[in-house]
Image (cartoon, grey):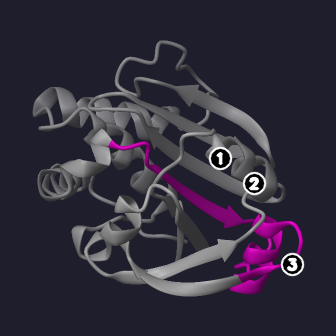
Amino acid sequence: MRSPLNVREVIEHYDSVLTVDEWILWNPVTWMVAEPFGGPWSLQEIGNKVSGEHDFHVEGIHVKEGMEDEDNPHLFIDFQGDAFFLFDTYDITDRHGRLQRLLGDDSLVWSVHFAGPARYTFNYLVNGQTQMSTNDILREDTLGVGVPLADDIEELRVAWRAQPGKYLSSAALTIMSTASGVTLSSEWLDSVQRTLVTENFP
């Protein structure tokens, strides 16, 4: 069982990340976390699902260099616990939607896609079925008993009302981490990471 994260600390963490890496907010970036029900998937399994043709390889590229290469979008991959995450530096063709369908079976999936400062879409899927999709996690008005992530979101809102974060987008990143237990850091964004390379991007 994953240890619960302190919501206030996570908000402050992502305020810090976005202060250093504000470029995330100005680019069509997607961050997706998946936790398979049956235990971790291997890099080979994930690559096969993404490429569709069992034709991919892995390269090491600096994340920020990948972000600047608009002609060759990079799909970075990393693992935390039983989950893995994908970081897409240039998602302008709804690739995250197709990846959610490819990777969603037998998994929990959380994703956030940025489309400019304070503009994002957060999605939560279970077994390939969308449970929540919102452009404003702080004001989503369909919450109630039994609604997925309702407790996590209410805890976020209570913390936000007590002390708002610096960036509205920190709220979306916070719910990604408090729900999945996976975090994104400035250190990770400023380092060489593995990227999946295939001629058959979804």
Residue type, label 2: Pro
Query: Left or right: where does residue 138 sit relative to residue 145?
Result: left
Can you give x and y, in whole percent of width and height, for residue 58 in the image? Answer: 61, 85
How far apart are the two marked residues, 2 and 1, measured between alpha carbons? 6 Å
Q: Which mark is residue 73?
A: none
- Name the residue that disc number 2 marks: 202
Is 29 within the magenta? yes
Q: Do the residues labelled 3 and 2 touch (CB within 8 Å)?
A: no
Can you give x and y, in whole percent of width and height, for residue 107 in the image? Answer: 75, 59
- Name the residue that disc number 1 marks: 95
- If you read the primary sequence from the N terminus, does the residue marked by circle 3 or circle 2 appear first? 3
Query: Left or right: where does residue 28 sit relative to residue 155?
Result: right
Q: Do the residues labelled 2 and 1 touch (CB within 8 Å)?
A: yes
Residue type, label 3: His
Q: 142 or 123, which lies in front? A: 123
Magenta stretch in the rendered image: 27-56
In the image, farthest residue toward the front: 71
Can you give x and y, in whole percent of width and height, for residue 105 in the image? Answer: 83, 55
Q: Do the residues labelled 1 and 3 touch (CB within 8 Å)?
A: no
Residue type, label 1: Arg
Q: 162 or 130, which lies in front? A: 130
Query: Left or right: where does residue 107 sit relative to residue 195?
Result: right
Task: Identify the element where label 3 is drawn.
Answer: loop
